Image (cartoon, rainbow, N blue to C red):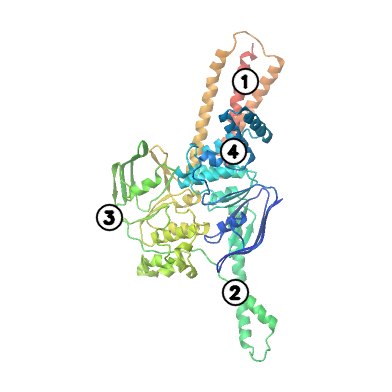
């Protein structure tokens, strides 16, 4: 059943066409992602769908009677509301019923209590409040009395996300839902949306998220929509095939064009003897042959200062804010060409650590010693700090007209911009006209062009499209200096780093060998072993409790209890076998995230069932042999 129909829509800003004659549909239950380069109009398209922006031509039709919710990149929340007030400001009937019931209980109005009680029962909304608290807890918004105006940008983003999730709309539209979420939250959101019955249309640059959640990819390119029925891996495969076919078509058109061009030139111009149809065909052929396939390349052999024998030495670093310990007695020596990833929940001190390394934040105790040859290149989460009325090329020229390359060569600022996917027609745009992702790309460019040999990147992939991220990864793979990266992009981290500093929030920093996926697999295995140990401890402790509480009178099992006892023994054997199979599954590195999540959920159910049946078996076993 079709829930959204988009027919021939066109959107322009002045002389610039954002998209033209787009046509696509979204069916019930589909989970669709829109991917495109920064500045291609993804957010504009979403805003047009929800009627926050108007299209120039075309039709956008949602199915009648469905609930549609939209989470923008910029949060639209009431600053004077508390978190709970903002969540309950939703027009969902179930939420309004719970809100009315809570207000009635506070006022003691028995008529209002009775009326709201009946409404909640009719709507079957008794579990709504529990669901609200569960989602807020996962998103770390437990203090629901905080006012929106006092929250950080990341917290506001989480409130906006909670609000749309709690509403359980029929059609959910999300613009960068994983921004400002830590890794645990992202993985929870993946599982939540994968199981959700809502139809979903989203824009996200998180490639693992695209892989796990989405079943359809819409690529917005050259003002046109291309549809791929599959996840992110399928999209990459089919896109490569499409580009190969396009290259083949262009090559054939160019070969034919050479022959036709020769024919056109040989015909007398004044006698009108040219065949009009053939001339028209030549013009069509020329349009195909002159197409350019933009290949995202960031191969920039920028000259890097030589690394000396001493890089960076940290000795007994300590940092606290009030009673909160951020870093406790951390010691480490960075080696040449080392690549370190930093992970940890929001607020555990990752950015503070980066600032202390560079002397931007004082240490409470300890020392940091930096080698004489080290030149830091620091990319933080703030937007580029330049005059918005400057042209893009002038931002680069203010740093240098020419960039020194290897082997004594140089590169002009204009060519450097092209390498960074700023074509000539964009170089004379004013900075204020750039999208958020384009501004971050420009800022990253200003960092790299200064020839650093020690790169420190704090969330470098935020707001960058998947195409820019892939070429940035290519650049960093060829980078010969040291690299420290803080990122919630698991795909990026897996490719870039050799080991991790894990900030656990207590001040301790663990050095874990391997990439992020290996770390999460080991963590999941450790959690399973901990739960198993706790479960076995409970089973051992059950028997003496039951023996104490059981009456001392002697009796035998009745017929029904004998049958139950026999069935429980058979059930316990089956459950133990299943538990063993699940344990092997959870140790299998070839399983997908979804398969691991499903196996983990089933393991929890099996362990709980084993506990319940073991408890009953022990109770019946006391009288089985009497």
**Front-most of residues 154 and 213:** 154
How many callouts does the rendering have?
A: 4
Number of other residues with Cα within 10 Å of mark 3, as a class: few under 14, some 14 to 19, many 20 or more: few
Q: Residue furthest bottom?
A: 271
State the image quarter where residue 188 is shown. Answer: top right
What secondary structure is marked by label 1? helix
Is label 4 or label 2 in front?
2
Label ID, residue 617? 1
Reading the image, the residue beneath label 4 is 599
The numbered mark, 2 or 1, whose residue comes first in the sequence reads 2
Reading the image, the residue beneath label 3 is 372
Is label 2 or label 1 in front?
2
**Front-most of residues 322 and 476:** 322
Left or right of 257 in this view: 348:
left
Q: Residue furthest top?
A: 553
Q: CA distance from mark 1 to mark 3?
A: 71 Å
State the image quarter where residue 113 is shown. Answer: top right
Label ID, residue 289? 2
Callout 2–callout 3 Cβ contact below 8 Å: no
The numbered mark, 2 or 3, whose residue comes first in the sequence reads 2
**Front-most of residues 492 and 73:** 73
């Amino acid at each position: 059943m079709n829930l959204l129909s988009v027919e021939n829509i066109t959107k322009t800003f002045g002389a610039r066409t954002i998209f033209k004659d787009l046509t696509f549909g979204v069916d019930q239950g589909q989970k669709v992602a829109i991917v495109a380069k920064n500045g291609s109009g993804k957010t504009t398209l979403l805003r047009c769908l929800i009627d926050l922006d108007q299209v120039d031509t075309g039709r956008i039709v949602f199915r009648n009677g469905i609930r549609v919710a939209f989470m923008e990149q910029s949060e639209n929340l009431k600053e004077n509301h508390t978190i709970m007030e903002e969540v309950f400001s939703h027009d969902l009937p179930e939420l309004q019923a719970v809100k009315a019931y809570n207000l009635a209980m506070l006022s003691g109005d028995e008529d209002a209590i009775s009326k709201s009680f009946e409404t909640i029962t009719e709507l079957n909304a008794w579990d709504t409040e529990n669901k609200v608290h569960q989602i807020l807890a996962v998103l770390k918004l437990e203090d629901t009395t905080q006012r929106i105006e006092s929250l950080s940008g990341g917290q506001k983003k989480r409130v906006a996300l909670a609000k749309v999730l709690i509403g359980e709309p029929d059609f959910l539209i999300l613009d960068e839902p994983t921004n400002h979420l830590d890794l645990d939250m992202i993985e929870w959101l993946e599982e939540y949306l994968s199981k959700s019955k809502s139809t979903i249309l989203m824009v996200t640059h998180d490639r693992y998220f695209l892989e796990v959640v989405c079943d359809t990819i819409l690529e917005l390119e050259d003002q046109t929509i291309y549809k791929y029925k599959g996840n992110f891996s399928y999209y990459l495969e089919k896109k490569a095939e499409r580009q190969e076919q396009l290259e083949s078509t262009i090559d054939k058109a160019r070969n034919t064009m050479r022959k036709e061009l020769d024919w056109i030139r040989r015909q007398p111009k004044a006698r009108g003897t040219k065949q009009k149809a053939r001339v028209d065909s030549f013009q069509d052929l020329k349009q195909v042959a002159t197409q350019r396939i933009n290949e995202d390349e960031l191969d920039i052999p920028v000259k890097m200062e030589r690394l000396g024998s001493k890089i960076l030495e940290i000795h007994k670093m300590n940092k606290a804010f009030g009673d909160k310990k951020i870093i406790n007695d951390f010691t480490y020596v960075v080696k040449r060409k080392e690549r370190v990833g930093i992970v940890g929940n929001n607020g555990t001190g990752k950015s503070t650590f980066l600032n202390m390394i560079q002397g931007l934040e004082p240490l409470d105790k300890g020392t940091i010693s930096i080698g004489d040859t080290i030149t830091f290149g620091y990319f933080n989460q703030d937007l580029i700090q330049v005059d918005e009325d400057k042209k893009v090329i002038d931002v680069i020229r203010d740093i240098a007209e020419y960039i020194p390359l290897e082997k004594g060569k140089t590169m002009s600022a204009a060519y450097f911009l092209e390498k960074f996917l700023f074509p000539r027609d964009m170089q004379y745009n004013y900075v204020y006209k750039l999208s958020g992702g384009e501004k971050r790309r420009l800022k990253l460019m200003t960092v790299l062009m200064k020839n650093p040999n020690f790169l420190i990147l704090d969330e470098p992939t935020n707001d960058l499209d998947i195409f820019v991220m892939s070429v940035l990864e290519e650049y960093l793979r060829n980078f010969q200096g040291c690299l420290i990266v803080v990122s919630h992009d698991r795909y990026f981290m897996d490719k870039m780093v050799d080991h991790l500093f894990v900030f656990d929030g207590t001040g301790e920093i663990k050095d874990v060998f391997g990439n992020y996926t290996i770390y999460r697999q080991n963590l999941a295995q450790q959690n399973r072993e901990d739960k198993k140990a706790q479960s076995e401890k409970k089973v051992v402790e059950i028997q003496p409790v039951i023996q104490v509480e059981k009456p001392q009178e002697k009796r035998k099992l009745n017929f029904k209890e004998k049958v139950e006892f026999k069935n429980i023994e058979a059930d316990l054997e089956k459950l133990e076998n299943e538990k063993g199979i699940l344990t092997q599954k959870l140790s299998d590195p070839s399983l997908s995230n979804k398969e691991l999540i499903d196996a983990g959920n089933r393991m929890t159910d099996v362990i709980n069932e084993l506990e319940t049946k073991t408890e009953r078996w022990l109770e019946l076993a006391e009288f089985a042999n009497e």
